[in-house]
Amino acid sequence: MTNTQGLMILIAGPYRSGTGDDPAKMAANVHAMEAYALPLFRAGHLPVLGEWFALPLLQLARSQRIGDAPFNEIFHPISERIVARCDGVLRIGGASQGADQMVAVAQAHGRQVFYRLQDIPGCEDLPDPYRLGGHAPYRAQSGR
């Protein structure tokens, strides 16, 4: 099903959380977020990940490690700028301060926050990509 009123949706999930900063585990986390991009696109939306913007810029800025000055200058700030221009955020995966920060930024800008793919218009009947190897959908704590 194609939605003619497509939304630009940032997919937010764990990047570093639970990885011990292991590059292979962080890449797997990006892959888990990317698994949601295709169904969103096919439903007529424009999916984006902050990592798609941040990681190439970190290379250009010659970031040497997570938490160095270029990383702190770019990684979360670019996602915050993207969220300010998005229609909404899809929060997936487990615990993540960064993903929770993107949800807070979205809410501060009056953007929609989705916690399941099926809550997004045009995606109601789609299966969760995590069944194909990604992360389970994020479960918000009560009171959030």
Image (cartoon, rainbow, N blue to C red):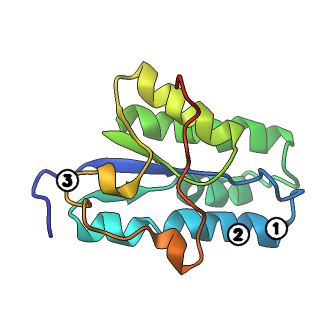
Residue at 44% across / 20% down in the picture? 108
**Between 97 and 56, which is closer to the camera in this rendering?**
97
Question: Identity of the amino acid at label 3?
Answer: Gly
Residue 8 visible to the viewer: yes
Q: Residue furthest left?
A: 4
- Look at the numbered disc 2 and give the secondary structure of its residue: helix
* Residue 33, percent from left and from top: 54, 62
Dot 1: few (<14), some (14–19), or many (≥20) neighbours within 10 Å?
A: few
Q: Which residue is mark 3?
A: 6
The part of the image, by quadrant, that contains residue 59 is: bottom right
- Which residue is denoted by mark 2 in the rendering? 27
Query: From this viewpoint, is residue 74 visible?
Result: no
Report the Cα–Cα distance between label 3 and label 1. Answer: 33 Å
The disc label shown at residue 23, or none? 1
Q: State how far apart marks 1 and 2 are (Cα).
A: 6 Å
Q: Which label number is shown at residue 45?
A: none
Amino acid at dot 2? Ala
